[in-house]
Amino acid sequence: MNKTARPAVLVARAVFPEVIERLRGVFEVEANPDDRVWSRAEFSTRLAGKQGALITGSERIDAELLDAHPQLRAVCNMAVGYNNIDVPACSARGVVATNTPDVLTETTADFGFALMMATARRMAESERFLRRGEWTKWSYDMFTGSDIHGATLGVLGMGRIGQAIARRGVHGFGMKLVYHNRSRLAPEIEAALGARWVGKAELLEASDHLVLVLPYSAESHHAIGAAELAAMKPSATLTNIARGGIVDDAALAQALREHRIAAAGLDVFEGEPALNPALLDLPNVVLTPHIASATVATRRAMADLAADNLVAALTGGTPPTPIDPGVPRRA
Ligand code: DGY
C-alpha cells in the first residue's frame, strides 16, 4: 500500500448515511448503494484492495476469503453475534475482528421479553383472527394463554442479554428464574436475581417460558431438537432471539403441530431469510424477521461502534470492542 494513501474500506450493506460520511472523512469508501446482499463472489471481488470492511451477519469471513485478500486488516461486524466470522482464522492472520456488544443489550432484551409475552398470550394469532373478521362474541376460553407473572422463566445462555431478560422477568414480573450456561453467574448476581443454575435437562423440564440467548456454534447447533422439545412441558413456550440453527426448526414445527409445547416465538431461523415453510402454516408460532435489536437508537449505536472499531483498527488506535483482544496486528 502507498503509505500516504488513505486506506480503502468496503461497507458491505446499507447503513446510516451519516456513518458513511464519517467514514469518507477517513477512508476511501466503497459502499453498497442499493443494499443488495452481495453473493460471496461479488463480496470477494469488491474486497479487492480494501484494508477494512464494515460487515453484517450476511457476510461470511473465513480462511479462504482472508487468504484471497492478504491486504485486509480489519473486519468490523455490525452485530454482537459473530458466527459469520472465523475468528481464529482472522487472529492467525493478524486481522482484527470486532463486534458490537453492550450497545444493544437492553433493546434486544426488551424485544425478547415482548416476543415471549406475545407468544404466551397469543397476540399474533388473535390479531390475525380479528383482522379476518372472525370476532363475533366474547368467550371465556377465547385465546386463553399462559401467565408470565409468577411463572418460571428459563434462560439458556446467560450472557449480557440473558441477564437483561432475567432482570425484566424477576424484577418486573415476579418470575422465578432457572438458567443454564457453561459458566455460572457470580454468587451476588445469582442472589440478586434469585437465579438457580440447573443442568440442561432440568432447565427444559422446569421452564414455563424458555428463552434462548446463547451464541451459535458447532456445539449449540440444534441444541433444541426433538428430544429437548419432548422434555418440555406441554404448556411451555419457547422463544429464540439468538440464532437460527440453535433450534431444529423442522422438529419445532412438528412439536407445535402436535401441541407437544404450547407455542413458540422466533426472531431467527435456520437458513434465514428463508423459513421452514411448515412454520408459516402454524397458528401457535409468532414469527418476526430478525429485528430484536431494531430500534433507531440502537441500530445507530451499533453502526457508530462498528465505525469506531474500523477507524481505530486502521489508524493505529485501539478498537473499542475486538472479539479477540489478543490478536497481533498485521503491519
Ligand atoms: C446481533 O447483533 O447479533 C443481532 O442478531 C443482529 O444481527
Image (tube, rainbow, N blue to C red):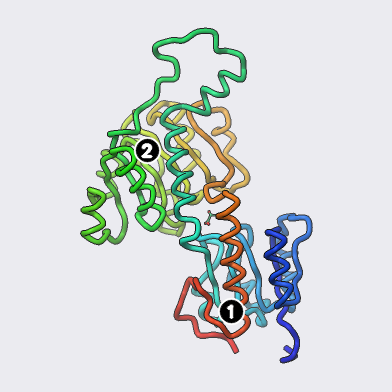
In this view, the residue in front, 307 or 143, is 307
On the picture, is 163 further left or further right than 27? left
- Check disc 1 and give the amino acid type: Ala
306 is higher (above) or lower (below) than 236: below
User: Which quadrant, please, contains the N terminus?
Assistant: bottom right
In this view, the residue in front, 275 or 227, is 275
Q: Residues within 10 Å of mark 1 (few under 14, many from 20)?
A: many
Secondary structure category for the residue under label 1:
helix
Q: CA distance from mark 2 to mark 1?
A: 44 Å
User: Which quadrant, please, contains the C terminus?
Assistant: bottom right
Q: Which mark is residue 131?
A: none
Q: Residue at x 73, y 68 (%)?
A: 21
Whether residue 323 is visible: yes
In this view, the residue in front, 228 or 185, is 185
Whether residue 231 is visible: no
145 is higher (above) or lower (below) than 330: above
